Image (cartoon, grey):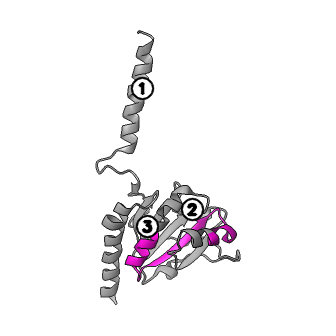
Amino acid sequence: MIRMIPVLLFSVLAALLFVALIGSSDGDVKRANGPLIDQPMKTLPLKDAESADMPLTPEDLHGKVTLINLLASWCAPCEAEMGELVALKDDAEAVQFIGIAWNDSPITIAPWLKKHGDPFDSMRYDPGGRAAIALGVRGIPETYVVDAKGTIRYQLSGPLTEDMRKNEVLPLLKQLQSEADDAR
């Protein structure tokens, strides 16, 4: 019995640590209030489907509410969220959706998007991960919402869920689109 005490203590501590890591005051640690929230979007060094330089610049975002999603065809959570991104695009047609294929190629991403749905107005590629590093990406999928002034207003690390789509991202996109329309 005495030999079991260290095992039990370790188990209890591990369980407490696990609960602390996955729990927070709102019950979700995937939403990020990272250092880029309320910061202007940087120029991201990206490529087009032919591997030519095609950076994503603040000028590409000016005047448009934009959702940027980093994904890969080999990423299971990316596949899991594609239906939610397609549904979100259907509900927010005026919003610009830009996909960034991280460490993936047009040869694999194009058929993958055809199979799982393609909500993107534009697809760019980050073969060396330089854009992901510039954004401080912790893993993919990762989603950013940028307002019409080019300011990052929302960041999600992990897959978009139906609840997040309906209760967080869609209301935010509608609010930002309304603000952009009022500013015109």
- Left of 124 or right of it: where is 35? left
Instruction: Say if the magenta span includes residue 147.
Output: no
Which residue is farthest front? 115
Q: Quadrant of residue 107?
A: bottom right
| Residue 150 is at least partly visible in this image | no
> Does residue 165 appear in this view?
yes
Q: Nearer the viewer, mark 2 or mark 3?
A: 3
Tag 3: amino acid: Glu
Residue wearing tag 2: 132
Label 1 or label 2, whichever lies nearer to me, is 1
- For the residues labelled 3 and 1, the Cα–Cα distance comes to 37 Å
**Which residue is the site of mark 1?**
11
Q: Local crowd at mark 2 within 10 Å, few (<14), some, or many (≥20)?
A: many
Tell me which residue sits at (35%, 80%) in the image: 177
Q: Which mark is residue 84?
A: 3
Dot 2 and dot 3 residues touching (CB under 8 Å): no
Going by the image, does 103 lie left or right of 61? right
Kind of residue indicated by mark 2: Ala
**Mark identifier at residue 166:** none
* Secondary structure found at label 2: helix
**Which quadrant, please, contains the N terminus?**
top left
Task: Look at label 1 and name its amino acid.
Answer: Ser
Q: Quadrant of residue 133?
A: bottom right
Q: Position of residue 61 (x, y in %)?
A: 47, 79
Q: Quadrant of the C terminus?
A: bottom left
Q: Magenta stretch containing residue 99, yes or no?
A: yes
Q: Secondary structure at mark 3?
A: helix
Magenta residues, as a range? Answer: 85-111
